[in-house]
Image (cartoon, rainbow, N blue to C red):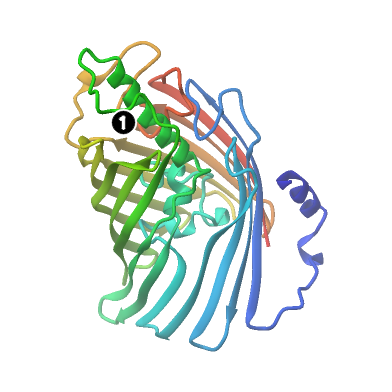
Amino acid sequence: MQIILLALAALIQPETLPALDLPDRVQLHGFASQGYLNSSGNNFLSDSIGGTFAFNEIGVNLNGLINNNFRYGGQLLSKKMGDYGDNDIRLDWGLVDYRVHDWGGARLGKVKIPVGLYNTERDSDFLRPMIFLPQSIYDETRRDTWQAHWGGEAYGNVEIPAFGNFDYKLFYGRIKYDEDSVFHDSTLTNINKRLADNQQAANPDPTLPPRIDDCDRDNEYLYGASLIYSPQVENLRLGVSWASQKDTSYGDSARIGGYKTNSNFVLSLEYSWRDFSLSAEYGENDRTQTLYDITTFDGPNQSWYVMLSYAATSRLSFTALYDEYWKDKHNKDDSVHASGRYNPSPWRKDWACGVRYDVNERWTVKGEWHTVDGTALLLDFFNPDGTERYWQYGAVKVSFNF
């Protein structure tokens, strides 16, 4: 379906797009993309070894003003990534927004989660230089659950002439975990793997079942804050964001564990100078995870990246990225290396390069290549026979925006 719509869009020139009979206060926009993903050594996000064209999405968003203070908006999204998404139409985000003044307003509905500089822009491919955001901060396997929450947000912009602008957001709500998501199926796979290990242990715990047939995850709360500071230095943004959440896991309708984010923070920097743009972020997620009253993890991970883009022309740009993630900030001992096919290395060190070409104001073509050391963030669900420590993946993508 995605490919057909892209082909139809290719026949439409920007200047000949039909005018929509919409009120002056209503805007309709959207995008469609088709990509190709290929990896060696490990499957990434899907069965990507050998290549897959199951990598596409379409989004249509509507924004309207009721008056100068009150607006509404939402986006429908259809996507496919490997065996997931299946191009079903879902609500990506949707809200009502009342702004009292520049310094204060409120939003209610399915509201985007403002973690880092770019989480609220994940569905706007034309705003970023590469196909994928840095995975250490913006894990693509959690995009469906970490894009938006059901709840509310207070926001505003405060300008202090001697210092600059401060954009703040305070949010509270709940996350909905879909049963037909990668996150759901990978969680079920991981739980059954632990239960199988227990059955094969010298002294297995008799209170644990041999396996479960289904699992569910319920979010009890999510809250946090974001602050973006734009000082009196042109094209510089500094940010800090923080979030906390608590989940309960169920297996075959019985409670089996929990997940609590005690503190998830991200420090951000973005700076543009002439034809160069630099982005860098650092984050830690201090979390506690339990399974059948056993603590399986307790402590912070560590994430950071540096990304540099160069605009060679008004249409052509190049990007270089180094992205690093550690599952356990306090355990970086190289002795955890393993040999052979299965390598449970709890880190991910990613060197990447990318190119972007804007054909015109509506069409964008991107390509990128990643060389990775480590298997952290990879899903056992896609790699049942184990993983390789050193691996690569690449992608190309064509996007149409209107």
In this view, the residue in front, 124 or 222, is 222
Query: Residue drawn 46% across and 43% down?
Result: 140
Q: Which residue is farthest left?
A: 330
Query: Residue drawn 32% across and 26% down?
Result: 194
Residue 66, position as x, y percentages in the image: 57, 86
Q: So how many labels did they put on this image?
A: 1
Query: Residue drawn 65% across and 48% down?
Result: 33
Would residue 351 be seen by someone viewing this image from the given angle?
no
**Which corner quadrant holds the C terminus?**
bottom right
**Mark 1 Cα shell of 10 Å, populated few (<14), some (14-19), many (≥20):** many
Q: Secondary structure at mark 1?
A: strand
Residue 375, position as x, y percentages in the image: 37, 27
Left or right for 129, reference 199: right
Left or right for 2, reference 25: right
Query: Residue drawn 23% across and 19% down?
Result: 204
Work out whether 274 lies above or below 3. below
Inspect the image, locate mark 1, and give the three-letter code of the amino acid beneath it.
Trp
Residue 246, position as x, y percentages in the image: 28, 53
Locate residue 299: give its quadrant.
top left
Would residue 347 be seen by someone viewing this image from the given angle?
yes
In this view, the residue in front, 281 or 193, is 193
Find disc 1 in the rendering and name its residue.
347
Work out whether 108 lies above or below 11. below
Residue 112, position as x, y percentages in the image: 44, 62
